[in-house]
């Protein structure tokens, strides 16, 4: 989307903005900065405060609405302060067809533009165009916010977000050390247990890795039972939340 903006409006006609908060996975800000620099676009990284929104902390099925409300309000203010009247996101046609995307409503309420979705471009289409344009992100695995790893009904806290982030880095180190490759990697905080999700082949190979289990425990999950399973996109949308206490 950013590259298309540059092609249509020139480098000075666009501004890249990445919202920074406890929910941003490690490495994503650096990757965003690198892409903006490669495209020759100015890039800003304002702080957002999702954890100050009760609806976000409560982590109901509408959590993303409160997250996007905070992020888009902040980004819109940044845009206006720098002379930009329109804000656009990379929402695609697959996103608008997904019934579990309450964040899209927040964008519509604020008049946020969605050029990819408006053009009917799916995620696969966006990847195909990105590859055609030689963008380094054309095959980058999806990396949703860290809050999406916490089962609905379990309060979102800075502690939970940080330990999920630490655990995912620990799992990646354990996989690399064992020579196991997995494009997908999620550490799911289920309250009473923790589940590591990997590509199907990698999950079978990683299930017995002592370094993986130790890394997850040391990241903050302690003695919580650990499950290693195959990755399923949107899995928590279909799982019932257990009762749990807030950390």
Image (spheres, rainbow, N blue to C red):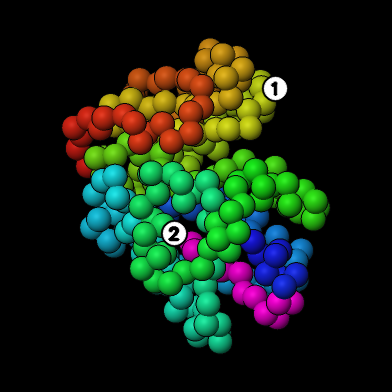
For residue 26, side relative to residue 237 (left or right): right
Residue 226 lies, in percent from the top left, at: 40, 21
> Would residue 228 be visible to someone looking at this image?
yes
Q: Quadrant of the C terminus?
A: top left
Residue 224 lies, in percent from the top left, at: 33, 24
Residue 191 lies, in percent from the top left, at: 29, 32
Q: Residue at x 29, y 54 (%)?
A: 56
Identify residue for label 2.
21
Q: Quadrant of residue 41?
A: bottom right
Q: Which residues are magenta?
A: 9-21
Q: Residue at x 64, y 61 (%)?
A: 1
- Circles 1, 2 touching at the beta carbon (< 8 Å): no
Out of 3 and 70, give the one closest to the viewer.
Answer: 3
Residue 15: say if magenta. Answer: yes
Identify residue for label 1.
179
Q: Residue at x 34, y 31 (%)?
A: 238
Out of 233 and 180, give the one closest to the viewer.
Answer: 233
């Amino acid at each position: 989307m950013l590259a298309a903006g540059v092609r249509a409006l020139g480098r000075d006609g666009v501004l890249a903005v990445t919202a920074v908060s406890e929910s941003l996975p490690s490495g994503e800000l650096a990757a965003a900065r690198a892409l903006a620099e490669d495209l020759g676009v100015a890039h800003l990284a304002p702080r957002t405060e999702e954890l100050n929104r009760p609806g976000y902390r409560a982590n109901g099925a509408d959590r993303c609405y409160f997250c996007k409300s905070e992020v888009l309000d902040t980004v819109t203010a940044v845009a206006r302060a720098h002379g930009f009247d329109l804000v656009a996101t990379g929402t695609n046609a697959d996103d608008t067809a997904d019934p579990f995307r309450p964040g899209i409503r927040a964008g519509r309420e604020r008049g946020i533009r969605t050029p990819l979705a408006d053009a009917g471009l799916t995620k696969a289409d966006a990847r195909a165009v990105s590859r055609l344009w030689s963008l380094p992100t054309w095959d980058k695995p999806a990396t949703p916010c860290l809050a999406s790893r916490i089962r609905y009904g379990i309060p979102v806290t800075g502690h939970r977000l940080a330990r999920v982030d630490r655990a995912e880095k620990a799992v990646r180190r354990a996989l690399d050390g064992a020579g196991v490759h997995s494009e997908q990697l999620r550490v799911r905080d289920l309250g009473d247990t923790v589940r590591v999700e990997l590509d199907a082949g990698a999950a079978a190979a990683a299930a017995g890795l002592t370094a993986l289990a130790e890394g997850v425990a040391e990241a903050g999950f302690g003695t919580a039972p650990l499950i290693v399973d195959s990755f399923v996109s949107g899995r928590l949308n279909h799982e019932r939340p257990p009762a749990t206490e807030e950390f």
